[in-house]
């Protein structure tokens, strides 16, 4: 269960270090802060992302959708919300991941809108949800990851001062826990979208997305539809359709976090 996941205490507990908490931390333990959800509106600034046949830029779909999702989540009172960008600026992929890791987020949800190259599969439509995998589930997933990934780097965890063998064990356990959380988040997201939003065939997919590579933050990437499909491009331009997507994503996030509410 990922709720209440805290990287430092997780590592310390596994290593048997028994780190002592300062006196002022007693109150924090009695009333822990609400979990933090990081929303990542894809692209921005000089990077418009996908562009539909009607000229719709992906970055202009993802930001208002993420802002609506932020509003719904904060209204629900079950979590705090941070965003990787709140305006039309470029944010490197590595920085998006770092923000979630630095703040020890409970989850990272990256929001995008897909597109196929001109003349290739422009009839494709429907939302899909991705988690990280070394091998993509299919050529479409692999191609999408290649288009989205602008940069990559190895994330450096600050592991406890233990032997390299113990560090490898700790990192392996953390990755397993994170992967399980990511898969759970993705399943909840697909289930929440189903019925409210058209879904791509086999909507739960896996690929090597840089933004999903945090080893200690459960992460999923949502493709809200295909801008390359003229009908879906028109849908994604409509605030009411984006609101339906945001409502479904809020339901998935609440399901992941459980019934924890503000005291």
Image (cartoon, rainbow, N blue to C red):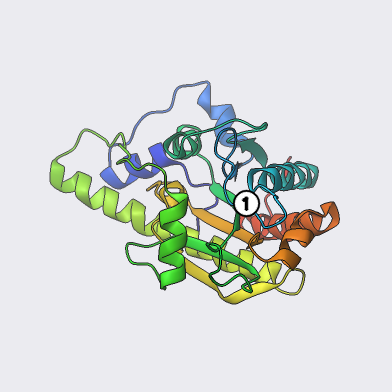
Residue 173 in picture, x, y percent from top left: 31, 55
Pointer 1 local density, CA inside 10 Å: few below 14, some 14–19, many at least 20: many
Residue 167 in picture, x, y percent from top left: 21, 44
Q: Secondary structure at mark 1?
A: loop
Q: Quadrant of the C terminus?
A: top right
Compared to residue 156, the image places residue 112 above or below, namely below
Outermost residue toward the right in this view: 240
Outermost residue toward the bottom in this view: 201
Describe residue 62's horizontal placement relative to residue 40 as left or right. right
Q: Residue at position x 59%, y 66% from top?
A: 128
Q: Of residues 118 and 193, which is closer to you in this image?
A: 118
Q: Residue at position x 26%, y 35% from top?
A: 160
Describe residue 208's horizontal placement relative to residue 103 as left or right. left
Quadrant of the rendered image containing residue 136:
bottom left
Which residue carries the number 1 mark? Answer: 51
Quadrant of the rendered image containing residue 225:
bottom right
Compared to residue 1, the image places residue 101 above or below, namely above
Residue 208 in picture, x, y percent from top left: 38, 57
């Amino acid at each position: 269960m990922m709720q209440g996941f805290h990287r430092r205490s997780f590592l310390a507990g596994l290593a048997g270090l028994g780190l002592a908490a300062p006196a002022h931390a007693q109150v924090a333990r009695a009333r822990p802060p609400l979990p933090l959800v990081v929303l990542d509106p894809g692209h921005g600034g000089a990077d418009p992302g996908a562009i539909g046949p009607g000229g719709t830029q992906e970055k202009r779909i993802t930001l208002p959708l993420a802002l609506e999702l932020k509003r719904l989540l904060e209204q629900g009172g079950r979590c705090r919300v941070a965003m990787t960008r709140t305006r039309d600026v470029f944010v490197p992929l590595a920085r998006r991941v770092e923000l979630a890791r630095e703040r020890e987020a409970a989850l990272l949800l990256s929001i995008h809108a897909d597109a196929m190259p001109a003349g290739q599969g422009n009839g494709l439509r429907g939302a899909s949800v991705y988690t990280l995998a070394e091998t993509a589930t299919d050529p479409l997933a692999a191609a999408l990851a290649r288009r989205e990934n602008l940069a990559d780097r190895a994330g450096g965890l600050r592991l406890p001062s233990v032997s390299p063998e113990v560090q490898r064990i700790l990192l392996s356990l953390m990755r397993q826990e994170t992967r399980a959380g990511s898969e759970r988040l993705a399943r909840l997201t697909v289930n929440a979208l189903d019925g409210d939003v058209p879904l791509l065939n086999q909507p739960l997919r896996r690929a090597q997305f840089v933004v999903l590579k945090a080893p200690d933050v459960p992460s999923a990437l949502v493709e809200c539809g295909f801008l390359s499909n003229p009908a879906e491009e028109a849908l994604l331009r409509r605030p009411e359709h984006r609101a339906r997507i945001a409502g479904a994503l809020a339901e998935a996030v609440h399901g992941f976090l459980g019934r924890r509410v503000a005291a």
